[in-house]
């Protein structure tokens, strides 16, 4: 049965490249630049607002980090009128790493090490920004025209399958490459991506994933049971490489190295030919939002957005607005905004608001945990943190609500909360939040100065407003943040 190409402005000459259980990949021509691109259209419909926001956030984050050599360039992303998400990506004619799983195409140890260093570096960069992939596997690592590999499918990876009960979807993961704690319903974490990458590298060397049987695909219960079996040794593989992969495949997430640690261990292996030179490690790349010149760089990016990126992400915002009035699955009444601020992938820091009980788009939030009322000092309805609350960085994707990465104030961070306030309206764009009179009044440099000691007052702090961070809308508190480069201790604040 023929399949119909999607209707996406600016793309023509559609030709199907591949079709899987959840998606169709097309080749298309981008008219404005006269180049061929790959368009992946997922068949799973995003009729839940939190899933739409997660897709847009992670696709946007991947677009921001597309300059990283280990991430496939994302040119565009969006959601079709029938709620199917899509990605417009760099065309990778080399296909995916699944081609290496055949016995007669097995890569050398040097090639596996090169792939591991490149993809681990990409994961280190995304983890530092608070983004997880959740479905690292050979099929999601593509090979470009120059035989270089890149990680693909941010935003589409690990979405639940169609009609799958939420409790049984396991976030759409691929069991063969999924960390055991994820199969036991633990929340996704960076250690899970490290396990999946190690399982991928193991499969490239062995021809199948670790603890995976030959023959028919096992059931989930069998997969979980097999995790208790010892890891089958890799035959004729350098012992150092095997040891690094064994450590990254440890059943205890805490015993695995970080993505950056895995990258460094692989790069240090003496496997004959030196690995392909890599750019600045991803951990450093990901610290672009936390360096001494962070303020100027963030302002420059906000003001000098490349025209193509602006058009791409503007289309996402338009799509979200158009979808806001839809009523998929009874999630919202016609004309009622349903978008909530993008979810944070990290747990809130100590003192952060968790889930105030106030509900409804027109009711103000209750006093959140970790805060006290300081309206008498700051005016309006104002909250002050009772303990320092800090953030490693902020992700701003065009005009979508900004996303913060919580960080312990005793560790390296960039921003600290100096005040907060309740929202009594829904905001679906960052500019909407910043234009609110109460936010302008509270998230102000003069308010901050009144709370600082003389030594810190008058400093060129960057002051910004952070929208609520809970995807389900339960957190209805915005925060006022200040920062200036890296700090490893909180700034002392008073109530003004």
Image: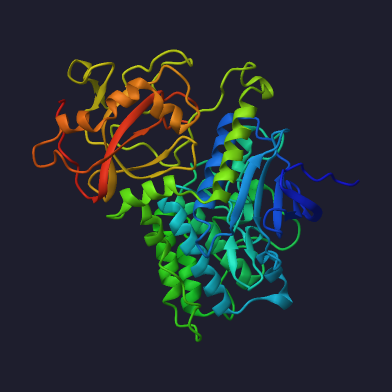
Splitting the image into 4 quarters, where does residue 6 fall? top right
When the figure is inspected, residue 467 is found, relative to residue 422, above or below; the finding is below
Q: Residue furthest left?
A: 454
- The structure residue drawn at horizontal position 32% and vertical position 50%, both measured from the top left corner, is 296
Q: Residue furthest right?
A: 1
**Percent of width and height locating residue 87:** 65, 48
- The structure residue drawn at horizontal position 67% and vertical position 45%, both measured from the top left corner, is 86
**Percent of width and height locating residue 108:** 60, 79
- In the rendered view of the protein, which quadrant contains the C terminus? top left
Q: Nearer the viewer, residue 495 or 158?
A: 495
Residue 234 in view: yes
Task: From the viewer's perspective, tell me whether residue 280 is left or right of residue 457.
Answer: right
Task: From the viewer's perspective, tell me whether residue 301 is left or right of residue 461.
Answer: right
**Percent of width and height locating residue 464:** 33, 36
- The structure residue drawn at horizontal position 56% and vertical position 21%, both measured from the top left corner, is 337
Task: From the viewer's perspective, tell me whether residue 455 is left or right of residue 204.
Answer: left
Q: Residue furthest top?
A: 363
**Percent of width and height locating residue 422:** 35, 20
Q: Nearer the viewer, residue 360 or 8?
A: 8
């Amino acid at each position: 049965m023929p399949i119909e190409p999607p209707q996406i402005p600016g793309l023509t000459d559609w030709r199907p490249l591949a079709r899987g259980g959840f998606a169709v990949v097309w080749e298309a021509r981008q008219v404005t630049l006269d180049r061929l691109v790959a368009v992946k259209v997922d068949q799973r419909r995003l009729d839940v607002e939190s899933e739409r926001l997660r897709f847009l956030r992670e696709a946007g984050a991947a677009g921001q980090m597309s300059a990283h050599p280990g991430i496939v360039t994302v040119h565009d992303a969006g959601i079709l009128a029938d709620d199917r998400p899509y990605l417009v990506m760099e065309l990778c004619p080399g296909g995916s790493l699944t081609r290496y799983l055949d016995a007669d195409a097995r890569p050398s140890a040097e090639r596996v090490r090169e792939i591991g260093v490149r993809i681990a570096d990409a994961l280190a960069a995304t983890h530092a920004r608070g983004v997880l992939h959740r479905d690292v596997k050979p099929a999601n690592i593509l090979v470009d025209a120059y035989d270089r590999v890149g990680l693909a499918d941010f935003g589409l990876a690990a979405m639940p399958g169609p009609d799958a009960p939420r409790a049984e979807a396991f976030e759409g993961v691929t069991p063969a490459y999924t960390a055991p704690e994820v199969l036991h319903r633990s929340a996704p974490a960076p250690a899970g991506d490290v396990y999946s990458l190690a399982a991928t590298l193991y499969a490239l060397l062995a021809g199948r994933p670790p603890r995976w049987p030959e023959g028919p695909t096992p059931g989930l219960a069998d997969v979980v049971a097999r995790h208790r079996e010892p890891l089958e040794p890799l035959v004729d593989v350098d012992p150092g490489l095997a040891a690094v992969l064994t450590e990254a495949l440890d059943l205890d997430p805490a015993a695995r190295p970080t993505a950056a640690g895995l990258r460094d261990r692989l790069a240090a292996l003496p496997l004959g030919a030196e690995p392909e030179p890599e750019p600045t490690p991803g951990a450093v790349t990901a610290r672009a939002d936390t360096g001494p010149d962070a303020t100027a760089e963030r302002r420059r990016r906000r003001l000098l957005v490349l025209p193509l990126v602006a058009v791409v992400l503007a289309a996402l915002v338009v799509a979200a607005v158009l979808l806001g009035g839809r009523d998929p699955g009874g999630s919202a009444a016609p004309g009622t905004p349903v978008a909530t601020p993008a979810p944070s992938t990290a747990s809130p820091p100590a003192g952060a608001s968790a889930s105030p009980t106030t509900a409804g788009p027109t009711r103000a939030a209750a006093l959140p945990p970790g805060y006290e009322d300081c309206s008498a000092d700051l005016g309006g309805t104002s909250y002050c943190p009772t303990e320092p609350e800090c953030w490693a960085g902020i992700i701003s994707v065009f005009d979508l609500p900004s996303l913060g990465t919580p960080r312990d104030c005793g560790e390296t961070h960039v921003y600290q909360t100096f005040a907060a306030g309740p929202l009594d309206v829904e905001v679906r764009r960052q500019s909407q939040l910043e234009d609110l009179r109460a936010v302008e009044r509270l998230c102000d440099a003069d308010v901050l100065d009144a709370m600082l000691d003389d030594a810190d007052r008058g400093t060129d702090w960057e002051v910004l407003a952070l929208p609520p961070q809970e995807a389900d809308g339960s957190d209805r508190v915005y925060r006022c943040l200040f920062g200036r480069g890296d700090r490893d201790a909180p700034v002392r604040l008073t109530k003004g």
